[in-house]
Image (spheres, rainbow, N blue to C red):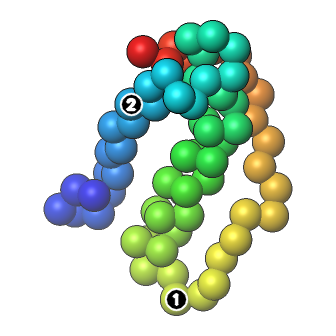
Amino acid sequence: MSEDNQVLVARILPGKFLVGHPGIVHGGFTAAVLDNLLGTLYFLGGSKKMGFTANLTINVRASRSAS
């Protein structure tokens, strides 16, 4: 999180153990990471209320290499 609380950067190196098709990151892993990062931003943004993901729809437009 940046000092002004405006930017959250995450570097994720999934590696070969989180693949669906050979060499391609599994879409479920991608969705879980996105959900977790958005939840983190929700609480870091100062919310005092409990929050949860009701729906998460992801349309994958390009695959992500696992290496």
18 over 2 or under it: above or below:
above
Q: Name the residue rendered at 55%, 17% in the picture.
A: 64
Residue 17 in the image: state x and y as whole percent. Answer: 53, 29
In this rendering, which labeled residue sits more in front, label 1 or label 2? Answer: 2
Q: CA distance from mark 1 to mark 2?
A: 31 Å
Please indicate whether residue 63 sits to the left or right of residue 16 in the image: right
Res 13 label: 2
Residue 12 in the image: state x and y as whole percent. Answer: 39, 36
Q: Name the residue rendered at 65%, 76% in the picture.
A: 51
Res 5 label: none
* Location of the C terminus (image quadrant): top left
Determine which residue is flagged by label 1: 48
Which residue of the protein is positioned furthest toward the front in this rendering?
17
Residue 19 location, quadrant: top right
Q: Name the residue rendered at 60%, 15% in the picture.
A: 24
Question: Marks 2 and 1: in contact by CB < 8 Å?
Answer: no
Residue 30 in the image: state x and y as whole percent. Answer: 60, 36
Q: Name the residue rendered at 17%, 62% in the picture.
A: 3
Please indicate whether residue 13 sits to the left or right of residue 3 in the image: right
Which residue of the protein is positioned furthest toward the bottom in this rendering?
48
Q: Amino acid at mark 2?
A: Leu
Secondary structure beneath label 1: loop
